[in-house]
Image (cartoon, rainbow, N blue to C red):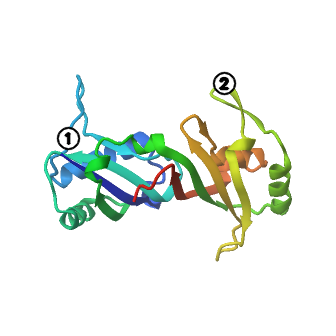
Amino acid sequence: MQRIRVFFSKTEAMRYTGHLDMQRAWERLLRRAGLPTVYSQGFNPRPRIQLAAALPLGFTSETEIVDFWLETQHEIHALEDQLKQVAPPGIAIHQVEEVSEEEQHAPALQSLMQSAEYLITLLQPIPDLPERTASLMAVDHLPRIRRKKKYDLCPLIFALDVLPNDEAGHQRLHMHLSAKESATGRPEEVLDAMGIEPHLARIHRVALHYEQSVG
């Protein structure tokens, strides 16, 4: 059995593809490539595929990772070419590697997640954006409700910075947020706390950080 790790981007063509549909897209991609995927056990066996971190509908990313398991050994360079040939629009494959034998049974990447960084592009001007950013970072508590449960957004924000405008003149923000399983900061909730409608922003994930190296 061989554990394969793929580093890829979710581009504009798949911006409105949610997490479960992205999982299915990888299942179809592996079938098109004709790869002997290992299946899960139980009444409804599925290809053994693990996406490192869920990416909400409407987000894009340049830093996605997926692990999958193959029944037989494959040469990595040939496998990378194979995957790139059948990848659909919206999935741009950057790198393919084999997970070492010592890590074959390591925990799922999602359980090792620590934080994530995002580039936010605002589609409408916010004249007082620096002031709103400074005000948010100056508070000690940001009480919020998610799925009917109260939580504090404040400790989940590691960094929030105003960046220079892009070439089209759009204002931009950089966010570094907690992404632990039990403590996840969501960029759309940070925008909402700043009084900015999330649907008026483009959210792009630029980095994922783990408690150990993943290649």
Q: Amino acid at mark 2?
A: Lys
Residue 175: x percent and y percent? 66, 56
Disc 2 crowd rating (10 Å Cα; few below 14, some 14-19, many 20+) is: few
Q: Nearer the viewer, mark 1 or mark 2?
A: 1
Is residue 15 shown left or right of residue 173?
Answer: left
Q: CA distance from mark 1 to mark 2?
A: 38 Å
Tag 1: Cα neighbours inside 10 Å, few (<14), some, or many (≥20)? some
- For badge 1, the amino acid type reads Val
Expressed as whole percent of the image width and height from the top left, the position of residue 140 reads 83, 42
Can you see residue 54? Answer: no
Q: Residue at x 22, y 67 (%)?
A: 77
Furthest-front residue in this view: 102
Front in this rendered view, residue 197 or 60: 60
Residue 148 numbered tag: 2
Circle 1 is placed at which residue position?
38
Q: Residue at x 47, y 51 (%)?
A: 212
Circle 1 sits in a helix, a strand or a loop, which is it?
A: loop
> Residue at (76%, 63%) from the top-left corner?
125
Which quadrant holds the C terminus? bottom left
For the residue pair 201 and 181, the one nearer the viewer reads as: 181
Q: Quadrant of the N terminus?
A: top left
Q: Quadrant of residue 120?
A: bottom right
Image location of residue 11, percent across then percent down: 45, 60
Would you say 58 lies left or right of 94 here?
A: right
Q: Is residue 3 above or below residue 13?
A: above
